Structures are given as structure tokens and as C-alpha cells.
Image: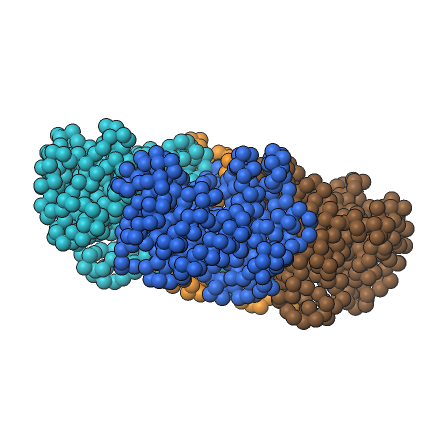
Chain colours: A blue, B brown, C orange, D cyan
Amino acid sequence: MNQQINVALIGAGRIGKLHGDNLLAHFPQVKLTGVASVPLEAGAEWASQKGIQRITDNYKELIDDPTIDAVLICSSTDTHAEIIIEAAKAGKHIFCEKPIATSVPRIMEALEAVKQAGVKLQVGFNRRFDPHFAKAQEMVANGDIGDLHILRITSRDPEAPPVEYVKVSGGMFLDMTIHDFDMARFLSGSEVEEVYATGAVLVDPAIGEAGDIDTAIIQLKFKSGAIGTIDNSRRAAYGYDQRIEVFGSKGQVAVANVTESNTVLSNGEAVVSEKPQYFFLQRYQQSFVRELKAFFEAVMDDKPTPVTGQDGLEPVLIAMAANRSVKENRPVPLDEIRKELNLL
Amino acid sequence: MNQQINVALIGAGRIGKLHGDNLLAHFPQVKLTGVASVPLEAGAEWASQKGIQRITDNYKELIDDPTIDAVLICSSTDTHAEIIIEAAKAGKHIFCEKPIATSVPRIMEALEAVKQAGVKLQVGFNRRFDPHFAKAQEMVANGDIGDLHILRITSRDPEAPPVEYVKVSGGMFLDMTIHDFDMARFLSGSEVEEVYATGAVLVDPAIGEAGDIDTAIIQLKFKSGAIGTIDNSRRAAYGYDQRIEVFGSKGQVAVANVTESNTVLSNGEAVVSEKPQYFFLQRYQQSFVRELKAFFEAVMDDKPTPVTGQDGLEPVLIAMAANRSVKENRPVPLDEIRKELNLL
Amino acid sequence: MNQQINVALIGAGRIGKLHGDNLLAHFPQVKLTGVASVPLEAGAEWASQKGIQRITDNYKELIDDPTIDAVLICSSTDTHAEIIIEAAKAGKHIFCEKPIATSVPRIMEALEAVKQAGVKLQVGFNRRFDPHFAKAQEMVANGDIGDLHILRITSRDPEAPPVEYVKVSGGMFLDMTIHDFDMARFLSGSEVEEVYATGAVLVDPAIGEAGDIDTAIIQLKFKSGAIGTIDNSRRAAYGYDQRIEVFGSKGQVAVANVTESNTVLSNGEAVVSEKPQYFFLQRYQQSFVRELKAFFEAVMDDKPTPVTGQDGLEPVLIAMAANRSVKENRPVPLDEIRKELNLL
Amino acid sequence: MNQQINVALIGAGRIGKLHGDNLLAHFPQVKLTGVASVPLEAGAEWASQKGIQRITDNYKELIDDPTIDAVLICSSTDTHAEIIIEAAKAGKHIFCEKPIATSVPRIMEALEAVKQAGVKLQVGFNRRFDPHFAKAQEMVANGDIGDLHILRITSRDPEAPPVEYVKVSGGMFLDMTIHDFDMARFLSGSEVEEVYATGAVLVDPAIGEAGDIDTAIIQLKFKSGAIGTIDNSRRAAYGYDQRIEVFGSKGQVAVANVTESNTVLSNGEAVVSEKPQYFFLQRYQQSFVRELKAFFEAVMDDKPTPVTGQDGLEPVLIAMAANRSVKENRPVPLDEIRKELNLL
């Protein structure tokens, strides 16, 4: 990485500021040329603190700036597709937070624009870049477990989201399990062929009243012949539970939770260890830096991004199949969803 | 436990000798009055070594002996139901190795005979008595995890059985997963309502040719509203993998594998720990003693046995539902199976 | 092991019954011919329960019996040396619980008698036979850690002994640390050359008033050039802490505590595991069986015993050096002790 | 922390750049006004990259600058005392990398200057600020283990330093164990009264030829009555081993190594985990940020620094006592050293 590239940050909310801070702290070859924030004040103080002089509430100014090479799209979900399309037309490389959009046709429009423009697109599935999960995937790809037979993912949040959020989230599969669907593809190196999911409302009845579920088990069949199971809960009393296991013909790789600290207290009652790290920002801190690193390397070295638009689309299809499976209590082939969306 | 009871051992194969040895070593109040072995020679040397004077190849002699209080049925599976029926008629309390029989009507006949006779029956689902699993179930029953939400069981063997055995085993669900179906009921304290299973042949094609599977994931819905997932493999390169996890509203209890030893070697390559204990006889050694203890206590104190005939039947129904689910690729309600067998 | 040997048990207290039970349960080729118990009643009920017909309060009857091949000496410490001498004279092989005696001259008398008679003597340092510690020693002997550099032993009891016992115990080093001195020799395969020890009274002032210590750190220099440190406490709030670590040129082997069960509970407060197994009889259960196995093999196959009289003597010398070191606050060479006792 | 303070960085070698980078990335209220680097070129490129305009090879320019509030002294050890004295005279608060100096009289001069000037001094014993060790100390201070009885520290490097470095390092105790002496004071909250140390040359004979040791065990007696043991090695085959254990009347707190990743591979041979993090910069990454945070908070809030000049002196005295102990093979009271240096 020896050139210099200019980047614009579109969106200065929590995740936008996070990416911005990382960019400033860790990427001397990348210049954070400007920030778009709506409303302006939301990002103004931060930008000023960080010494970023150019801040606007109109992202098009940044997209139209010929000196800018790439954009980081961290704005609200409903704006992602539109900004991708415009940025692609302006020839900018794009890093976009997940999801690309909440409807497949909209996603397809964005991907088409990117394809037409020939720019690079990377989707923010950061967990692939977590050192622990990345290492596990490396070991699988390296043949350490032989052929993958069984994949297991456990993903549980410390707190359920507010019911207001649940109502507009698109449902647990699109909002939360989407990461696990991506992780399943990442670890298996294969596509999901069929899904059978069971959903339940066990954490908070209000979530059920809002039309969503809060607990689920999703069974997957992969093209490769491997099978998998994901279990989710919106609330684990002990915090943020993020574990994977890949089992194959030669063995198994497992990743346990990262705890708050390594202290172990032994006393008259028990042997007491710390709970898992509580906040996703803390647990996945390194992954946010590493995904940006991968993006900038792809841009500078003219390589494909490691998480493409297609990688952004597939988990949405899996989520849609899972929703249908819960609703109709049957296994749902991905091709059934693809066919309806004219993707076959 | 202050009386003395007389017990006959029917069957002196591997599991019969195991129970016999445990009986002699750990139960001073229980007298092993006689052994039935077919053929006689198979058990004769062992019986002699152990100082058991009465050995016969005709189990009915022992069943007809009025001084005998209880029988341990460890003979071949196809004889279990018949011996149960005769022992029940003779008023003997019965400990019977799993399975009671391979067909539900036959199981029902045996259970009916036991019911009519008013004797006690305990089925040999020993894993319930493993100190680690028993402790986990205790914690769940004690409310340590609140209401059960998600149950996970991983059960993998070190070696697949010979194809000859596979052909007569009744299939992986009836032969191997049956323990996990029992464990699921034991841990959840609930009944399984519905099953969706995916089976695959990933370990050995010969197993598929023999009409069976060697890898599976089974999803369960419990009457209580909880959900569960079991994953099985006939061959784990690292040995015998037996793990459970119960997750609920207040937390989670997990049981990891018991390893060969606690030694940890750190060297230039890695930090190396021992693999799980390889043989089921070793891993579950204590459980075999403890299940007999529970049986003898039930007999001596006139209490119900902790693993009843009904406990012996239910996992067979779940296995049948799982087989159908794999065959027809749909979720199968247990009531569908029960209805066909006139059990509703 | 294909012959039959006849054994007499001398002493039927707690440890005597333990050895007796193990002998009966696990060694078909060994016949427990008779038991000596003082007083007779102390062992009579147990002997009767176990079907041992010959019980006496005069051990000489058993020693004089020409059919008896070996004796297990589990009587009170002050009788060990005398019984060893008489048994040796009678040509019996000897397994003797630690310690051989509390004074070195008396130990030397016993060892001399054994040498003269040419019989086998094994001392009951059972922890060498614990599967975990034995495996660690195997790995060291196998070169897995290269040359030993640093040895660490932690040994803490769940409860301090009663002050009455402390007064006659010979002191913590002779009573408790003696096992660790033996373990240090066993793991290092070397002799201790010099000792520096710090003792403190931190658990119970009454122990100090009784003239003993309850907390200590002992530093060891080995002939091989390796160095070591042992830390002891008479009371760990969390139970029975028994850990070792051997560090060398190629790596390290560590043995952690064995816990009550493998259950791990994660809840709103913490991740809670079980405490170490509490009772030495439970923690070292297998070691008692395995040390007898080694003894009987030595007898039957005419091999040296793995824990000789010399192995019984050395830790006593180390304990004496440690006591002097605490008293005079200086390092004490073992040769200083040996010289005074005319052992050089 | 709501004011702004101006800081000068003196020394732009590896540790200087590390502190500088952290300062820039994590402390918006702290302005890195200038950098002194000898030679100038060594730090010039870095300063330029970081946007630091003022760089000089004469640190006095920065010290004389009235706008500068504090200095970070990261220059070579032999300059520390001199710069402390001058900075103190100029009324600057001081963060100084360890050690203050290699001779006690020189340390005393520096501490006297700081005292006279009434400025704040913090010494760079960063491990106190490691989240894991800090948490352990917090638990001890909180009474979680009751009264401290036994302290254990293991500290082993992945690679021995070059012999050239060994010759000028002041010896292993002053160069490496110094951190453990500080950790012992930090965890125990007490002073070391007496030291007995054993040193050996087991890793590399060249180190012995250079007059140093590479393996050691140091026993400590604390004023509080607690006792402790530290073991060191200049080379652990498995990397960087940094562990502590504090045992007391109510229990024990232990901190294990932080591994490269949480992946665990189970295969036909073993269960394989990652080695400890290899580089001290990686293992203690957070501690460097947190120690600066503590320093700036002390400056801004006019509080005492958490690692004072006295904290910088004591471990040097302990190291001197340890050296004498090895040389003369006897326990050495700290007061003996203090007396000779007129510190009593």
C-alpha cells in the first residue's frame, strides 16, 4: 500500500464515526477528505475535533468531487442503495455498511450500477475480519478439518432491541441472523441450498406482538453437501455470545467467546470467570479496522474486494427463505426465492 | 439401602459383564445369585473368576427362582421384550438395557406386561447418570437457567460401526441418536412435539449404500415452547464428542468433553491438550454404576425408577419421526406417529 | 500378571480399608488372605462384609504364615518400621504407607532389613500414579519439554488439620509437603541438592502456637542444574489445589486441578465453573489402584518396585533441610543433613 | 478531562513512537507540540507523517518552552535522570520510561529534583495498566481474596536478548525481573522486606560468559507477612509467558496468558490451541494507552500519579538485593541495601 487515496465519509452516526476514527488512526495513506452528515450538527463537532475541515449535509458534493477516490457509506439503511448508485456513476469505489437495501430488487439495482461502472464495492460484514473467525476460516480453507461436514453457529445478543426498532427492523433474520448467514457462507466456502427454520417468542412477548420472533434455530443445507445449524436469541443473560464450530472429515475448529478479562477467581463457592465482552463495538473492535484495511488494499492494488455485492445479496435471500420457512413450517429451497425474484 | 436383594444377570456379553462387575464391586447389599449366558461358555469363565456359582444357558431357571428379586437384562436386543414379559409375569423387578425392542408394538407389549404385574422397570439410558450431565440437569431443574429456551446436543462417535452392523442396526437415529433423544427429554423436562431432520452420508459411502446415514442434524420443538438442535456424526477424527448446552431466560449451562488427562503441553508449535476420552465405557464408567444404584434404590425403597418404560418408548417415537422427516424432507409431528400406532 | 499371590492387609483404618477394597475389586489374581486390625472390632465388620474370613489383632500371625507372599502395611505410622523389619525377615514383599518412619535412623534400620532380606519394598507415594501427574512425568521423560529448567508445584489443602494432630504430625514439611518433595524428585528425575524455605503462620495462629507453620514456599536446587519452587497452604477456600508445571528448553507441561464436574454456568453475574475435587480420596482415587497394580506387577514379574525405600527416605531428608532452613533462615545443602546422619 | 495540555515527546525510538502514536490517536485534549529525536532523522519521517511540525535534536528547546506542560521521556536510559532533573527545574510534569537510572544515587538525584520542583512524575511500569492485571489488583484491593498469603508470578520471554545487550543491560534482574518486582508491590500493596534468589544459566552459555543469568527463581517476604515467588526465563519455546496468581484467606485470583486467537483445533492427534501473544507490544498494547491516560488525568486533575518516583526506586533496590542474594547464596534484607545507600 504505497499510494495515497482520498476518501469521503457519508454518514457520521455511531458507525460512521467509528469508521472515521479508525481511518484517521490507522491509515496514513488514506486521507479523509470530507464528511457528509445529516443533520450537519450531528457530525460537526466530531469532524472539528478530528481536524476534518470539509463537512457538508449534501453528500453529492463529495461524490461529485473528482479528487475523491472512494466513499464509505454509513448513512441510514434506506439511503444506501441510492448513494451506491450515484457513487458508482461518479466512478467512486464503495465501502457500504450492511445492508445494501431491505428489498432484493433495490439491491439488484445497486449491484447493477456498480457492475456497469466497474468500480469496487465492499459490504460491511465485519465479522469475517474478526481475528478469531478469520483464523478459523483460514484453517478450514487450509484443509485442517478436511471436508466440512457440520457447521454450528451460536449468536445471542445481550439485550433485545426496543420494540419500536423491531417494528422497522425487517425481522430478526434480516436484522440479526444476517451476520450468521454471511458467516455460514464465509466458513463453508459454499452456497446455502435450502433452509428450515423454527422461530419462537420466548424473550419478550412484545416482540411477538410486533410481529417478530426473538429465538430461532435455522438449519442449512449447503451445495457442498455439508449441513449446518444456527441458533439465535435476542437476550442472553450473560451477554454477547458469539461462537462458531466447523466440523469435518479431519477434525474440528471451534471459536469460543472473548471474555472481559482473563482473571479467574476461585473462592468458597466456585471458580468464577468473566463474562463475554458485552458490546459488539468492543468484541469486534479489530474487525472494523481490518475490513477497512482490506477495502483500501483492494482499491490501491486493484484487487477484488473480499466481501462483494453478491456477498451482500445472498444472506438476504437466505433470510427471506428462513422467514418463509417459519411462516409455512416447511423447508424452503433458495432457488424458490431466486425464481420468484427472477434471479435464476 | 439396608436390606439385601437377590439379582440375576441375564446376558454375559460385554455390557452384561460390565454390569456384573459393577454389581459385585459396589453393591454389598445386592447378591448376584445367578447368571444366564448364551452360549454358556461365553460367560462361564467370567462367572467362575468372580465366584458366581450358578450359571445357566436357560434364563427361565433364574426367572422362575422365587428367591430372586430382580433381573438385569443384558442379552441381545431381540430377546429383551420376551424376557421382560416373562420376568414381569414372575413378579421380578427389571433393569433392561436399551432398547426395549425395535418395534413399537413389541415395546407396548412389554410395557403392558410390566404394568399388569406392577413390577418396576428401568431402561438403561445410562448417560442420564453421568455425573456431568446429571449435574447439568439438576441445575436446570433447580432454575439456574430460568425457563429453557434453546437446547443443543453434539454427539459424535470416534469410529463408524461396521457396515454389517449398520444393516441390522435400525439406522443411526434408532442406534445412536436414541441416547440424544433421551437426553433431550431428560434435560428439558418436556416432550418433543415435532421433529425436522437432515441426514447425509459424508463419512463412508458404504453406510449410504447400506441404506443408512452417518451425519445428521435434528431440530426439535418441545411442548414447553423450547427449541433444540442435535448434531451427530459417526466419526470424529478427535474421538468421542459428547457435549450439551441448555440456554434459558437466566443463563446457560454447558458440559464439555472429559479429556484423557489434564496435561497441557506448550511448545514451539502450539498449546496442546489431550483429546476427549475415546471409549464410551471409559467416558461413561461412573454412569453405569450410578444407574444400577438408582435401580436398586428404587427396588429397596419401593420408589418409581428414574427411567421408566415410557422413557424407553418416547425416544423410539422421536427416532421414527426423524427417519420419516429425512425421507420426506418435512417436519413430522410426534402425534402423527402416535396416531398411526394407536398411541393417542 | 498370570500367577496368584496371597496378600495380608495390616491395618484396617481408613487407608487400610481403601487399599483392601481396591484389592478385592480390581485384582483377581491377588487373594486377600487375612487382615490384622487393632483393635479387632475396628476392622471386623468390614472384613466380614467383604467375605474375608481371617482377621486377627496380632499381625505376626499373618507375617509368620508361609503361604502369604506380600503384606500391605497400613497401620499407624509408629508401627511401620517394626512391621517392615519383621515382614522382611519373614521373606515377605512389602507395600508400606508413607512415611516409613519419622526418624531417619529408624528408616535406615527398616531399609537395611529389606536389603538384607532381598525382598521388595514399595512406599505409598500414590500421587506418582495419578493418571494426570504420571502422564506429565512421562512427557518429561520422553523429552517433550527438553531439559528441565524450572519446576513449580502448588499444593494446598481444603482444611487445616486439628491442632492436636499438628502437635504430633512432625510439622507441615514432614506431614504435607513430603508428597511434593517426592513429586519434585519424580518429575525432575534428579536429586535435590539444596533447599531454601520460608514458612509463615497465616491460616491459624493456633498452628503457630503449636510450633508449626501453615503456609510456605520452598525453593529447590537440583543436581541436574534445574531449579524449583513449591508453595503450600493448609487452607485454600476453594478446596484442594494440586497443580504442577515443568518448564524446559523445549516447552512446558502443566497439570491443572480436576474439578467436581465439567458443568459451566453462564449467568447475569459471571461464568461459573466447579471447584476442584475436594477430598484427596476422590481426587487420587485412581492412583491408589494404580500403585497397587505396580506393586503386584513388581512382585509377580520380579521387577524393582517403582517407589523404593530410597524414594521413601529422600523426601524426609529434604523436609529436614527445609525445617532447618526456616529455623535458621539460610539455604541448607542436603549433604549437610546427610553428613550429620552418616549417610554420606 | 476538559482542558487542553501541551506535551513534548523526548526520544522517538521504538517506544517513543509508540507513545507518540497513542497520544495522537487517543487523547484529543493533549497536543503533541514537539518531538526531540537524536539523531534528528531517526524521528523526522515519523513526525512528518504524523503532522508534527516541530522536531529538534535538542530537547532543551522543548523543555524551555513555557507553553509545554509535560514531557514524555523515552530517550536512552542513560539520559533519563538528566532530562528529569532539567524538566523538573523547568516546572514540567514528567512521564518517564523505566528505568529512571541504573544507579540508586542517580535515581535519588532525579527524585530530589522532582520533589523540589513539586511537579508530577510517573514511571512507565505499564503492566500495572494491563486490563487483566489491573483487574486482578482491583479484586485483591477489593478484598475478594481476603488477606494475601502467597503471590506467584511467572515471567518468561520468547527470546533471549543478544549477548551484546546482555553485557550492558545491568543483568536480568534489573532488565527483565524489574517489571515483576513492580508487579509484586502493585498486587500485594506491600513492601518487600527480604529476598532470596537462585540464578542459573540454562538457556545460553554465552549469557553466563557475559556475566549474567538467564533463569531464576526469586523468593520474597513482604512486610505484610505474605510470601511470594517469581520465576523467570529468558526463553520460553512457546513464546511470551506472563502469568500471576494471588492467593489469600478467601480465595485466589489468577491471570492466564492471552493467546493469539481463540481458535481450538481438534484432530486425530490432539486438541490444539494457540500460543500466547508473542510480542510485548502486542500483549501490552492497551497498557501503554492506559498508563498515558492515567498520567494525563493526574496532570489535568492535579492528582498524584499512580506510579511514582518511589515506585521507580523500590524495584531497583529489590533487584540489587536479588543480585547480592545470588552472588552470596543467602537471603538479603532490603534494609541492608537501603542502609548502604543511606536510604534508611
Looking at the rendering, in which quadrant would you find the C terminus of chain A?
Answer: bottom right
User: Quick check: C147 left or right of B204?
Assistant: left
Percent coordinates x, y for residue C284 in the rendering = 55, 50
Nearest to the observer: residue A277 or residue A14: A14
Residue drawn at point x = 25 percent, y = 62 percent: D205
User: Quick check: C178 left or right of A200?
Assistant: left
Residue with the most extreme top position: D302
Using the rendered image of the protein, determine whether residue A274 is visible from the camera's viewpoint: no
Percent coordinates x, y for residue D156 in the rendering = 33, 53
Using the rendered image of the protein, determine whether residue D69 is visible from the camera's viewpoint: yes
Q: Is residue B319 above or below residue C304?
A: above
Residue drawn at point x = 65 percent, y = 50 percent: A325
User: Quick check: D283 left or right of C121?
Assistant: left
Nearest to the observer: residue D37 or residue C28: D37
Q: Is residue D196 above or below residue B159?
A: above
Nearest to the observer: residue D7 or residue D190: D7
Q: Across the whole image, how many numbered discs are drawn on residues?
A: 0
Looking at the rendering, in which quadrant would you find the N terminus of chain A?
Answer: bottom left
Percent coordinates x, y for residue B229 in the rendering = 64, 51
Residue drawn at point x = 84 percent, y = 62 percent: B56
Q: Is residue C269 above or below residue D276?
A: above
Percent coordinates x, y for residue A223 in the rendering = 58, 63
Residue drawn at point x = 24 percent, y = 30 percent: D3
User: Quick check: A242 left or right of B201?
Assistant: left
